[in-house]
């Protein structure tokens, strides 16, 4: 695959594969049919503008990495942390963990992941958490966090990244039309083929 870049993407992919072996063991492998998706992620996280233009990626927005269970979304986002500059560092936070924090700490969790300490976060496995009750009140915690972070995207250009197995219609069904609309306008969609094999 040719890119309009001064970066050698083949070498970067080989380097990421070695880093993946360090992190996940000798069975880690980047498959040839995933190179295009990985190249899009590399272009975004290296802020390689010519290649991002080639892939229609908006560097002002975050990333939504979608695909079936086991295709490697979470592992790839952890690997991308090694490509980011100090000003674009991000944390990867499982949505299920946030829902468990909400059970313990209540509505402060919504502020924790949005307004109280705004930073770039990748919300991992969107859709694996459940609506939860805090003192009898049911709350879609992740939906509230995403709406708050959208406001910060508009006012402060704060980026959010997401990994998910959900389709666009499933996101709307789970989180509502407002969340789906805001995700569409604040995230670049990078998607594995729905038939991508489970690599676990």
Image (tube, rainbow, N blue to C red):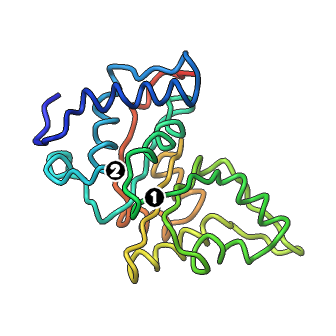
Which sits in the foreground, 193 or 41? 41
The alpha-carbon separation of the residues under discs 1 and 2 comes to 10 Å
Q: Check disc 1: other Cα within 10 Å, few if <14, some if 14-19, many if 20+.
A: some
Which sits in the foreground, 189 or 200? 200
Task: Check the picture and name the quadrant holding the N terminus.
Answer: top left
Q: Residue at x 46, y 73 (%)?
A: 150
Q: Residue 108's spot in the image, x, y percent?
A: 73, 77
Numbered disc total? 2
Left or right, 52 with reference to 156: left
Q: Residue 91's spot in the image, x, y percent?
A: 55, 56
Task: Check the picture and name the quadrant holding the C terminus.
Answer: top right
Q: Which mark is residue 146?
A: none
Q: Residue 106's spot in the image, x, y percent?
A: 80, 73
In the orientation shown, which residue stands out farthest toward the top? 27
Q: Check disc 2: other Cα within 10 Å, few if <14, some if 14-19, many if 20+.
A: many
Residue 105 found in image quarter: bottom right
Residue 62's place in the image compared with 192, above or below, is: below
Q: Residue at x 51, y 42 (%)?
A: 78
Q: Nearer the viewer, mark 1 or mark 2?
A: 1
Label 1 element class = loop
In the orientation shown, which residue stands out farthest toward the bottom? 155
Residue 179's place in the image compared with 68, above or below, is: below
| Residue at which label 2 appears | 45
In the orientation shown, which residue stands out farthest toward the right? 135
Q: Sequence-wise, which precedes: disc 1 or disc 2?
A: 2
| Residue at which label 1 appears | 89
Q: Residue at x 58, y 49 (%)?
A: 124
Q: Residue at x 36, y 44 (%)?
A: 190
Label 2 element class = helix
Which sits in the foreground, 122 or 83? 83
Left or right, 70 with reference to 152: right
Q: Residue 37's spot in the image, x, y percent?
A: 33, 36
């Amino acid at each position: 695959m040719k890119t309009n870049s001064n970066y050698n993407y083949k070498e970067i992919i080989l380097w990421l594969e070695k880093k993946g072996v360090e992190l996940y063991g000798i069975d880690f492998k980047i498959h040839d049919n995933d190179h295009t998706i990985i190249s899009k992620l590399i272009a975004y996280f290296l802020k390689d503008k010519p290649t991002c233009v080639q892939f229609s990626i908006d560097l002002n927005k975050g990333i939504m990495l979608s695909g079936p269970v086991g295709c490697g979304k979470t592992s790839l986002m952890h690997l991308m942390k090694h490509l980011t500059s100090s000003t674009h560092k991000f944390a990867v936070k499982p949505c299920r963990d946030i829902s468990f924090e909400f059970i313990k700490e209540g509505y402060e969790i919504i502020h924790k992941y949005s307004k109280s300490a705004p930073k770039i976060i990748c919300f991992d496995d969107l859709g694996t958490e459940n609506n939860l009750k805090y003192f009898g009140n049911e709350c879609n915690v992740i939906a509230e966090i995403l709406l708050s972070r959208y406001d910060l995207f508009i006012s402060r250009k704060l980026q959010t990244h997401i990994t998910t197995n959900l389709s666009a219609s499933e996101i709307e069904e789970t989180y509502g039309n407002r969340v789906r609309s805001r995700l569409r306008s604040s995230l670049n969609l990078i998607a594995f083929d729905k038939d991508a094999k489970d690599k676990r």
